[in-house]
């Protein structure tokens, strides 16, 4: 499987750190939802989360007060 390029996901000077945190949070959400619904995932949650960000289904929202 081809992985999306970081430049495809990050836009407007978003940080790599923000991407990692956002992907981790989304992957945890996918994993928790699958556990609660007793569903077996076909793809690893991190891969699914990365692809969702690459397709634009989710966006990184940085808090400007944190000084990134």
Image (cartoon, rainbow, N blue to C red):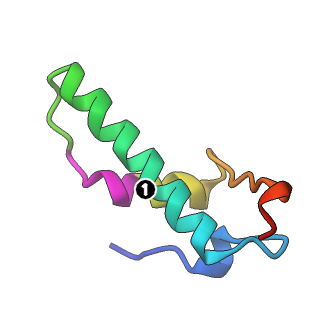
Query: Vertically, is 36 above or below 27?
Result: above
Residue drawn at (66%, 52%), measured in percent from left and top? 56
**Residue at the outermost top position:** 37
- Residue 10 left/right relative to 40: right
The residue to which callout 1 is attached is 24
Residue 35: say if magenta: no
Residue 19 spot, x, y in % from top left: 58, 65
Q: Quadrant of residue 2?
A: bottom left
Asked if the magenta segment contains residue 43, the reply would be yes
| Residue shown at the point (75%, 71%) measured from the top left | 14
Which region shows up in magenta? 42-48
The percent position of residue 54, horizontal first and vertical second, equals: 59, 61
**Relative height, residue 61 to residue 1 (above, below):** above
Give the residue displayed 36% in from the left and 60% down from the top.
47
64 and 22: which is toward the camera: 64
The image quadrant of residue 39 is top left
Q: Quadrant of the C terminus?
A: bottom right
Mark 1 neighbour density, 10 Å: few (under 14) some (14–19) many (20 or more)? some
Q: Quadrant location of residue 40?
A: top left
């Amino acid at each position: 499987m081809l992985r999306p390029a970081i430049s495809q996901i990050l836009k407007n000077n978003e940080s790599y750190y923000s991407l990692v945190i956002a992907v981790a949070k989304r992957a945890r959400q996918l994993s928790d939802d699958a556990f609660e619904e007793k569903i077996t995932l076909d793809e690893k949650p991190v891969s699914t989360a990365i692809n969702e960000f690459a397709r634009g289904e989710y966006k990184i929202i940085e808090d400007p007060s944190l000084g990134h």
